Image (spheres, rainbow, N blue to C red):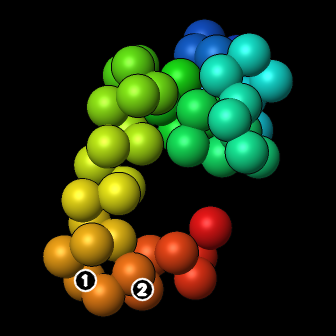
């Protein structure tokens, strides 16, 4: 018996419920089990501290 049948696969996807612009940060929050607002605040702080380089990834 393989492990794939025993454990459900956790998928990363864009959120439709917590979407502000594209739902990417909301999906990351759902995937990590965190409030999407916390993920957005961390993203904004990281963007400000690193010269907005993370904005290129979104």
Position of 57 relative to 3 (above/below): below
Q: What is the number of the mark on residue 53?
A: 2
Residue 2 falls in image quadrant: top right
Residue 51 is left or right of residue 15, and the answer is left
Residue at position x 32%, y 31% from top? 38
Residue position for label 1: 50
Residue at position x 73%, y 45% from top? 21
- Where disc 2 sits, the SS reads helix
Percent of width and height locating residue 56:
58, 82
Does residue 16 appear anywhere in the picture?
A: yes
Position of 19 relative to 54 (above/below): above
Q: Nearer the viewer, residue 52 or 27?
A: 52
Percent of width and height locating residue 45:
24, 59
Q: Nearer the viewer, residue 45 or 27?
A: 45
**Residues marked 1 and 2 touching at CB (< 8 Å):** yes
Does residue 32 appear anywhere in the picture?
A: no
**How packed is label 2: few (under 14 Cα within 10 Å), some, or many (20 or more)?**
few
Q: Nearer the viewer, residue 7 or 1?
A: 7
Determine the CA span between mark 1 and mark 2.
Answer: 6 Å
Residue at position x 74%, y 16% from top? 17
**What quarter of the picture does the C terminus occupy?**
bottom right
Residue 42 is left or right of residue 29, and the answer is left
Residue 54 is left or right of residue 16, and the answer is left
**What quarter of the picture does the N terminus occupy?**
top right
**How packed is label 1: few (under 14 Cα within 10 Å), some, or many (20 or more)?**
few
């Amino acid at each position: 018996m393989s492990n794939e049948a025993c454990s459900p696969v956790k998928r990363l996807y864009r959120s439709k419920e917590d979407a502000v612009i594209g739902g990417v940060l909301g999906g990351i929050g759902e995937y990590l089990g965190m409030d999407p607002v916390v993920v957005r605040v961390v993203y904004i702080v990281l963007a400000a501290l690193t010269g907005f380089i993370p904005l290129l990834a979104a």
